[in-house]
Structures are given as structure tokens and as C-alpha cells.
């Protein structure tokens, strides 16, 4: 069976989950260095005024004039900011009128009410919850060393780049009549709008 190598995002975009549902073994990169401006600590949703970023604040090691690399798995979340409260408020504001927000609300809400310390650990919780909500059984493994050019796997780590535009099939969105269709938002956008049909949407787009 084919192995697909991916970075682990924060409620990854629809294009990320398109790869996850394929009949393959998912290999998550666990040994990379953290990089800014990626889906590692941000996700995009559809707010009343268009595309809205939800960003998880992190603790930076860098001091003036000194640049230090830290492993993604070692990155700590900055909880001095009430980011969880803000993210949940934004999600409710954006999706409370969507067809399936109430359907998933009780499952997702605890992620935004219990303090988290490590970014990667939290992202695994988000990923596992999405799979649980969608009744997805995903066979995944974690890397044990970082390889710049791995062999024998389909390397899709580039999908973690938040600046990369990806076109996807259209589905109904809450504010679509106002702002038009916005592609490749968080998997939550697809779930809240399509519910259990999310799997069919992802599987048919192959």
C-alpha cells in the first residue's frame, strides 16, 4: 500500500484531508523544524466578512540577534492569550447557522475549553477528533527521523504551506451568496456545511 508523507496541521485544509482519505498509509512528519506562516498553527474559516484566520500563538525561543530552530514537536503554545476562547467564539459566529454545526458542536467544544501546552500534541487531538466525527479509521504512523528527500513515499509535506492556493470542487458555504465560494478552508468548514457527506465529497474528488 502506498505511503503518503504529510505534516500535521491545525484543523487542516480540505486539500489535506483529500489525501488522508485515500487508500494509503499516512505518515506524519514528527521530526521537522517548526516554520512560521504554515498550517501548523493556523487555519482559515469563512466568517461573515469573508476569509478569516484563526492563529494559535506560540512561545518563541528567539532572542534579539539570535535565531534558534526548534522542533515542531517541542513548540509550546502561548496561553497568556485567550486564543481558545477567541477561536471558539469565531467558529460559533461563523457556523452556528450552518446545517451541521450543532451536530458536531458537543464533540469539538472541549478542544477549546481545556488548556493545551504543546502545539503538535494539540493538533493530533484535533486530527483524531475529526476522524472520530467522520467515522474515519485512518492507518497512520509517525516519522522517527527527518529526511529531506525520503524514498519510497509520496512526499506531500508541501501542503502545509498556508500561502499555496489550491482549487477544490464547490460545495455550499454559509456566506457564499454574499462573498462567493472560498476554496480550501479548514476541514471544519466542509464538515459544518456537508456533515456526514464530507467523506463522499473527499472520496469523489480524486
Image (cartoon, grey):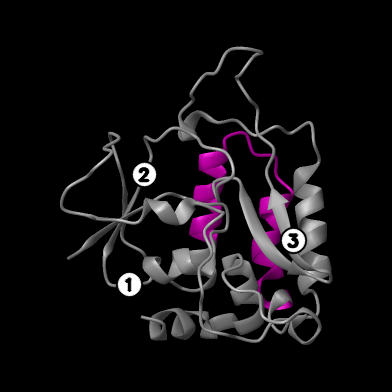
Residue highlighted by disc 1:
22
Is tag 1's residue or tag 3's residue first in the polypeptide sequence? 1
Across and down, in percent, residue 204 comes to 40, 86
Q: Decide which of tag 2 and tag 1 comes sooner along the chain.
A: 1
Quadrant of res 181: bottom right
| Residue 113 on the magenta segment | yes
Kindly identify which numbered label has been placed on residue 29. Answer: 2
CA–CA distance in space, label 3 to label 2: 27 Å
Q: Is residue 73 visible?
A: yes
Nearest the camera: 99 or 62?
Answer: 62
Residue drawn at x 54%, y 48% is 123
Q: Which residues are magenta?
A: 102-129
What residue sits right under mark 3 in the picture? 52
Question: Quadrant where the N terminus lies?
Answer: bottom left
Q: Is residue 137 visible?
A: no
Q: Main secondary structure of the magenta part?
A: helix
Q: Residue at x 61, y 67 (%)?
A: 185
Q: Which is more foreground, mark 1 or mark 3?
A: 3
Amino acid at each position: 500500500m502506498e505511503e503518503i508523507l504529510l505534516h500535521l496541521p491545525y484543523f487542516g485544509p480540505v486539500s489535506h484531508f483529500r489525501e488522508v482519505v485515500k487508500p494509503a498509509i499516512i505518515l506524519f512528519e514528527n521530526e521537522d523544524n517548526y516554520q512560521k506562516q504554515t498550517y501548523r498553527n493556523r487555519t482559515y474559516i469563512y466568517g461573515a466578512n469573508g476569509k478569516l484566520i484563526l492563529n494559535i500563538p506560540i512561545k518563541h525561543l528567539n532572542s534579539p540577534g539570535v535565531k534558534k530552530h526548534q522542533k515542531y514537536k517541542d513548540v509550546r503554545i502561548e496561553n497568556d492569550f485567550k486564543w481558545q476562547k477567541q477561536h471558539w467564539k469565531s467558529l460559533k459566529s461563523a457556523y452556528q447557522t450552518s446545517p451541521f454545526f450543532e451536530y458536531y458542536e458537543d464533540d469539538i467544544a472541549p478542544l477549546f475549553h481545556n488548556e493545551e501546552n504543546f502545539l503538535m500534541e494539540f493538533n493530533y487531538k484535533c486530527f483524531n477528533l475529526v476522524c472520530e466525527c467522520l467515522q474515519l479509521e485512518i492507518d497512520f504512523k509517525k516519522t522517527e527521523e527527518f529526511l529531506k528527500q525520503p524514498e519510497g513515499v509520496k512526499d506531500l509535506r508541501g501542503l502545509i504551506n498556508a500561502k499555496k492556493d489550491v482549487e477544490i470542487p464547490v460545495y455550499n458555504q454559509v456566506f457564499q451568496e454574499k462573498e462567493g465560494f472560498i476554496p480550501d478552508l479548514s476541514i471544519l468548514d466542509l464538515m459544518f456545511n456537508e456533515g456526514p457527506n464530507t467523506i463522499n465529497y473527499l472520496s469523489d474528488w480524486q
